[in-house]
Image (cartoon, coloured by chain):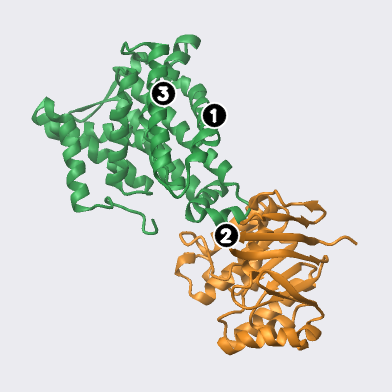
């Protein structure tokens, strides 16, 4: 079976700074891929390349059977991609519910009461239901992180991209979030998850990839990857800084 | 009693100013575009109304059925064809381009319709009046004010209760994220401009029935529109109506003191409010 998402030698640099260096990898349908790497390794830039916020200098991106390299961010989104942001970026002048509705109606292609009910279900799942009519700008950091997940889920994604969604959460919050993501994965949604909280990541993902300087360092079974000396060196390096 | 009359007439005049301002307010709110050509687009609406009434023999109010969609279409094409390309971090390009557009519209109108003042004939509507106590109100100003309220209430409803309005607000809030949510910014802006010019068409026709117009009067209408928007507070549509009313009342009271003071009094009221409340009377909190 062809890969669901495939990056083929994707490169991107800003002047002398390279954020993606002939990056190639595949994600199969229904798979959950975890991505780790030091700060500044090009993880978030890779998300930007996949969602279309950045366009690559060279290389090609295929998604769900078509070459999307030249497609706009809006078009990619309607094709079934949704992401959360590391630094939450809600529509701050709109309510939590309205934020969810934008995703459900525009990206998810739902209408009227179907969209409303879908949003309410997702808000229940992400534990934001009691905050539904609060302006998104008034949420706490944790609330905003949850809103990121809510918005991504309301888009009814085929591919869900999570960018450090567990960062800054307490242990209990993290556990409940991991459960939520597991449930989503169990429904067949393909997931790419960038995370520094490795134990959260390992609880969900089927495959792990390590990125540094915009290059793929290693890829494979999560446990095997975590134990490889190369990864230990890079990864323990971050742990020491953190 | 004469003063009460002046205030009431000014209030009704404010309805027309609110119609001038509503499109301007909408466009600024959604895409932060200051449209210098707005006044000339109002005049264009009036001339289109004139052509439609002359060619089809329609009453000016009935001509709205043709002119509003025509202006909306012009708006969409204008936005997609030209204005979208000017939007970015730099605020200067849209100002320059809409200024150029203003010059082009004025000269095109001059070529097509000449510089002679024109007026639309609305028959009995122009002179009909209703009496309330000892006040006599022109039916046309009352109708204009009523239309202004309906237009602003509809825009308000659209903004806060419909899916299109949510899309407008989301795009205005964070364009980049809106794109990632599947909203096509260019299309959304096109729709916003279409809606704004639809409202502008109404403003143009009400203007053309009320007074005579020629291709050069756009600049003055733009100023009234701006003043109404800023008095009311940016991004607040009901504020825009109140801004229009304050401007209208200031003008009629000025005219009551001395006929030469009409415009000056309006500008003074604007300056005073700007000095006391630089953000306008009712700015939206999250602007």
Q: Residue A216 shows which numbered tag? A: none
Residue at the (65%, 60%) spot, across then down: A12
Q: Quadrant of residue B191?
A: top right
Front-lying residue, A13 or B180: A13
| Depth check, front residue: A232 or B166 | A232
Tell if the residue under mark 2 belongs to the same chain as the one under mark 3: no
For label 2, the residue is: A15
Expressed as whole percent of the image width and height from the top left, the position of residue B281 reads: 27, 51
Badges 2 and 1, same chain? no
Figure quadrant of residue B240: top left
| Residue at the image position 19 percent from the left and 33 percent from the top | B251
How packed is label 1: few (under 14 Cα within 10 Å), some, or many (20 or more)? some
- Residue A145 drawn above or below residue B148: below
> What colour has chain A?
orange
Residue B104 marker: 3
Q: Disc 1 to disc 3, how far (Cα)?
A: 18 Å
Nearer the camera: disc 2 or disc 3: 2
Quarter of the C terminus of chain B within the rendering: bottom left
Which residue corresponds to mark 1? Answer: B73
Q: Is residue B176 above or below residue B116?
A: below
The tint of chain B in the picture is green
**Chain letter belonging to callout 2:** A
């Amino acid at each position: 079976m062809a890969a669901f998402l495939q990056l083929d030698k994707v490169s991107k640099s800003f002047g002398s700074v390279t954020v993606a260096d002939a990056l190639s990898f595949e994600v199969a349908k229904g798979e959950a891929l975890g991505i780790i790497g030091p700060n500044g390794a090009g993880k978030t830039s890779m998300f930007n390349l996949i969602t279309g916020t950045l366009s690559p200098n060279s290389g090609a991106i295929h998604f769900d059977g078509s070459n999307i390299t030249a497609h706009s961010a809006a078009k990619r989104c309607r094709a079934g991609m949704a992401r959360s942001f590391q630094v939450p970026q809600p529509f701050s002048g709109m309510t939590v519910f309205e934020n969810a509705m934008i995703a459900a109606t525009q990206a998810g292609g739902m209408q009227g009461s179907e969209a409303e009910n879908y949003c309410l279900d997702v808000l229940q799942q992400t534990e934001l239901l009691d905050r539904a009519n609060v302006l998104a700008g008034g949420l706490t950091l944790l609330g905003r992180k949850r809103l990121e997940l809510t918005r991504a889920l309301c888009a009814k994604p085929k591919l869900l991209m999570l960018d450090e969604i567990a960062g800054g959460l307490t242990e209990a919050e993290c556990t409940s979030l991991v459960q939520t993501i597991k449930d989503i994965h169990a429904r067949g949604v393909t997931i790419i998850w960038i995370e520094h909280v490795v134990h959260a990541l390992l609880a969900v993902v089927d495959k792990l990839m390590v990125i540094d300087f915009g290059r793929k360092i290693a890829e494979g079974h999560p446990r095997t990857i975590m134990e490889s000396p190369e990864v230990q060196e890079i990864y323990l390096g971050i742990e020491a800084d953190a | 009693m004469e003063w009460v009359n002046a205030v009431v007439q000014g209030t009704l005049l404010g309805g027309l100013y609110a119609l001038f301002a509503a499109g301007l307010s909408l466009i600024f709110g959604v895409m932060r575009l200051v449209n210098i050509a707005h006044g000339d687009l109002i005049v264009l609406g009036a001339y289109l109304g004139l052509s439609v009434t002359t060619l089809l023999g329609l009453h000016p109010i009935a001509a709205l059925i043709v002119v509003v969609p025509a202006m909306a279409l012009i708006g969409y094409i204008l936005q997609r064809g030209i204005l979208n390309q000017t939007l970015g971090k730099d605020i200067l390009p849209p100002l320059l381009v809409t200024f150029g557009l203003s010059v082009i519209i004025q000269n095109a109108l001059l070529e097509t319709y000449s510089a002679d003042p024109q007026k639309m004939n609305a028959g009995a509507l122009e002179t009909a009046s209703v009496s309330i106590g000892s006040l006599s109100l022109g039916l046309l100003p009352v109708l204009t004010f009523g239309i202004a309220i309906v237009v602003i209430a509809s825009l308000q409803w659209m903004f806060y209760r419909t899916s299109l309005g949510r899309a407008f607000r989301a795009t205005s809030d964070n364009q980049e994220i809106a794109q990632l949510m599947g909203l096509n910014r260019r299309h959304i802006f096109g729709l916003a401009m279409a809606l704004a010019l639809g409202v502008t068409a109404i403003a143009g026709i009400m203007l053309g029935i009320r007074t005579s117009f020629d291709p050069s009067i756009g600049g003055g209408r733009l100023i009234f529109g701006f003043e109404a928007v800023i008095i009311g507070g940016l991004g607040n549509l009901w504020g825009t109506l109140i801004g229009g009313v304050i401007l209208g009342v200031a003008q009629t009271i000025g005219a009551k003191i001395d006929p030469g003071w009409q415009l000056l009094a309006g500008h003074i009221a604007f300056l005073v409010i700007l000095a006391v409340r630089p953000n306008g009377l009712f700015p939206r909190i999250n602007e």
